[in-house]
Amino acid sequence: MNNWKKYLMNAACASLCLLGFNTVVLAVTPETKIVPTPKYQLAQTPVGYCTVSDPTDSPLNIRERPNGEVIGILENGTVVAIG
């Protein structure tokens, strides 16, 4: 994986952690099977996508900065490209 891709993935994981998500880092090989994790599930693929999965079934607020004005929402099941 290129250095810039590693940087983007680390920055994305750090951003999601700051938003209160628990992230799981996976090493993906042809033999790897990605299995959903319980509680605060964050589905990840090697190309930088995740799925919104909030156990409270409330939408995820989108903000430009922490505690800023809500500029949008993402419903559960929405696939988001990271990067």
Image: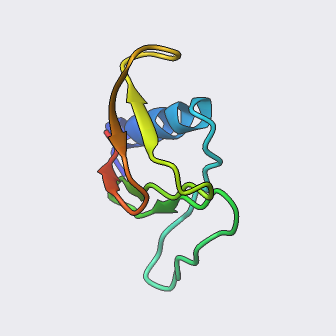
* Number of numbered discs overlaid on the protein picture: 0
Is 74 in front, or is 11?
Answer: 74
Residue 17 is situated, as x and y percent measured from the top left of the image, at 60, 36
Could you tell me which residue is drawn at 53 percent across and 82 percent down?
33
Residue 3 lies, with reference to residue 26, above or below; the image says: above
Could you tell me which residue is drawn at 32 percent across and 51 percent down?
80
Is 56 in front, or is 5?
Answer: 56
Q: Is residue 79 left or right of residue 22?
A: left
Is 72 in front, or is 19?
Answer: 72
Where is residue 79, by image quadrant?
bottom left
Q: Quadrant where the C terminus lies? A: top left
Residue 19 lies, with reference to residue 31, above or below; the image says: above
Residue 53 is situated, as x and y percent measured from the top left of the image, at 51, 58
Is 55 in front, or is 13?
Answer: 55
The furthest residue to the right: 39
Where is residue 42, by image quadrant?
bottom right
Model colouring: rainbow
Q: Is residue 38 left or right of residue 5?
A: right
Residue 26 lies, with reference to residue 6, above or below; the image says: below
Could you tell me which residue is drawn at 52 percent across and 76 percent down?
34
Residue 32 lies, with reference to residue 57, above or below; the image says: below
Could you tell me which residue is drawn at 34 percent across and 58 percent down?
78
